[in-house]
Amino acid sequence: MNIRLSLDALQVLDAIARKGSFAAAAESLYRVPSAITYTVRQLEQALGVSLFSRHGRRAELTAAGEELLREGRHLLQAAGELEARVKRVATGIETELAIAFNDLFRVESLYPILEAFYRESFGTRIRLLREVYGGSWDALTTGRADISLGAPGDAPPGGGYVTKVMGTLEFVFAVAPSHPLAALPQPLQNQDIMQYRSISAADSSRNLPPRTSGILTGQDVLTVPDMACKLQAQINGLGVGYLPRSLAEHHAALGELVILQVAEPKPQAQSFLAWRSNGGKAQQWFIKQLEQLRLEQLMM
């Protein structure tokens, strides 16, 4: 026989287990005791098992009852969360919000904002996405993200989103102290640089054309997942390339990198905060907080 467990029956089982008796469970659910007894009897008959052992006024779960309630409480919790999400949609609060952040940024810089957000009790689930280069735009325009923090360079064509300039990023050419380019006279010419491998962080775009920058025609390339990997590859002398000035200067001070002058430097790039224009109350709250961040607070 097919058994269809109702949420009502699971609530009754949960109340009896928590309160210790049918009478106390009935009182907590604002029902008469006979209704509680009837619900349990019907469920036991349908399942063909005993769910409670009764000792006077006390009711204790059998092994079968404990197993049913253990799994049933997951269903009750899921049903409660679903009900809350539906209510939040009706009040203009998103059930989920995806925030893409540039791989040049430290994710820890977002944690204080997240802590403040959770104190507001929006009930919105947050998903953080680390994106590389043009992937920050791709995540926004394809709907993978609702907010993009640190989207670099020109925005792709099309609409449906709002942008605000966060600041300008300056890049410098850096190599390991032992790299052959470190011994050449400066400024370095393109014909000198192209003889050596470039380290490139792979653009994480899925739909937009991937972007590249600072790679010369015919130059060998080692492609790595993100800026953190690119930095380590250059420190280890596996190749050369451009790094944000603050990041390169920090590791140059540690003696791990050398910053070199080049004849044709990489231009500065603007960094944007961008968000979908149809967002709800949770997104609006986040935008107000993110607009107050400075690039220096976010950078690796």
Image (tube, rainbow, N blue to C red):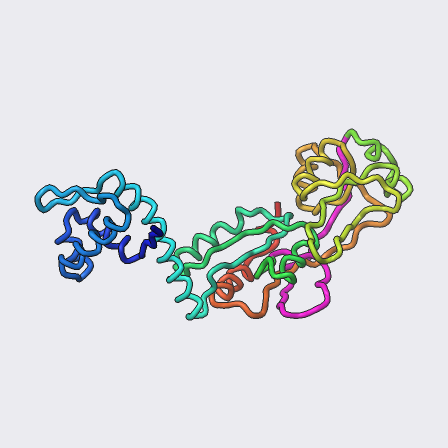
**Residue 132: x, y in percent?**
67, 49
Q: Is the magenta region chiefly helix, strand or loop?
A: strand
Which quarter of the picture shows residue 98? bottom right
**Residue 140: x, y in percent?**
63, 60
Q: Is residue 93 above or below residue 253?
A: below
Q: Is residue 240 above or below residue 109?
A: above
Which quarter of the picture shows residue 250? top right
**Residue 269: x, y in percent?**
73, 56
- Residue at 69%, 54% (x, y): give it: 206
Magenta region, residue range: 149-177
Q: Does the magenta stretch include residue 200?
A: no
Which of the two residues, 184 or 201, is positioned nearer the viewer here?
A: 201
- Residue at 32%, 54% (x, y): give it: 5
Left or right of 173? Residue 90 is: left
**Residue 15: x, y in percent?**
22, 52
Which of the two residues, 24 or 275, is positioned nearer the viewer here?
A: 24
Left or right of 32? Residue 290 is: right
Q: Is residue 158 magenta?
A: yes
Q: Is residue 40 above or below residue 272?
A: above
Left or right of 65? Residue 201 is: right
